[in-house]
Amino acid sequence: MKKRTKDNCFRILRFLLGATLLSLHSSCHLLYQQKEELGINPKYEGYVPAKILAAPCLLWPASVSYEDQLPTLMAKPELKNLCLKFDQFVIESFSNQPFMKGYSPKAISQLLKKSGKEGYLSMAPGIWEKSSIPCQKCHSALSAFEEKVCALPGWQKWLLELSQISHYSDAYLQPIVVSARKETIDQNGQQLSKLSAEILLVLLNTNNSEIIWKSAKFSSILTETEMAKKNWEIPRISSWEGLYLRLFNESLWIDFPGRINTYRR
């Protein structure tokens, strides 16, 4: 009886330690946001796009460099699922929003197919990679996108043509997975699995590629490895679902033009 009590106490202590670690890591995205000037561009205060092109998620091209850039360490199927979750989140976020109107990724693909430009969306990463603009201010993916990508004539031309194909949509919404990592770390002799990801969500003016609104988030989650989990009796959600919940929530839409936002700071 005493042995069972000790075992239960040990499990509870391990659970509390894990919860503390998760809490510490979930706060990372708040620290990340404080370093960036997120939200609406002052130039576009009061502006609400008439039609938004909600593009499918893109993976950040590694060749578009910036300071402290983290390489992605994740299998392609897992990266694909992360992007699909991002797309799903964006599409669902248009529901019950009377002032957010436009085209979904599927609708954009149908428009492009009718125009004989089926591979048009896949050209975007290749255009970004042509950026050779030196940028001393590029300390993050967001600043690199603003300074190096938005200034590209090829990118501006690409957006303008996409606007014309979509009956002159005035805004373009791009979800981006900047980096994603799946690692195993040792925490005081305990093997932990760590998932982390950095994402961007930017709204652009299709006429000049200026950023109308921007949001960014970094989050990570620590759980025991699959082998260690077998010794646990407390049911928990999967680490993937935990990461998705921290990345894809209402806080990502703060100050989005025309959005009825329920998030409270």
Image: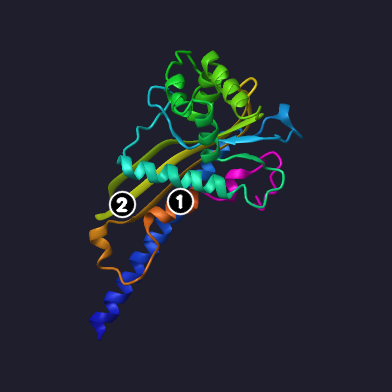
Q: Which mark is residue 193?
A: 2
In the image, is residue 249 part of the stretch drawn in magenta? yes
Q: Please state the horizontal and vertical placement of residue 221, each as a whole percent of the image.
A: 40, 51
Query: Residue shown at 71%/41% (left/top)?
Result: 258
Q: Where residue 140 sits in the image (x, y, percent)?
A: 48, 29
For label 2, the SS is strand
Whether 244 is drawn above or below 136: the answer is below
Instruction: Using the rendered image of the protein, determine whether residue 137 is visible from the camera's viewpoint.
Output: no
Residue at position x 59%, y 26% in the image:
165
Q: Earlier in the sequence, mark 1 or mark 2?
A: 2
On residue 244, which mark appears? 1
Residue furthest bottom in the image: 1
Occupied quadrant, residue 203: top right
In the rendered structure, which amino acid carries the disc numbered 1?
Tyr
Instruction: Label the magenta part by its dominant secondary structure.
Output: loop
Image coordinates of residue 37 in percent, x first then y, are 61, 33
**Vertical arrangement, residue 235 with respect to residue 223, above or below:** below
Q: Quadrant of the N terminus?
A: bottom left
* Front in this rendered view, residue 76 or 180: 76
Span highlighted in magenta in the image: 248-265
Q: Nearer the viewer, residue 101 or 176?
A: 101
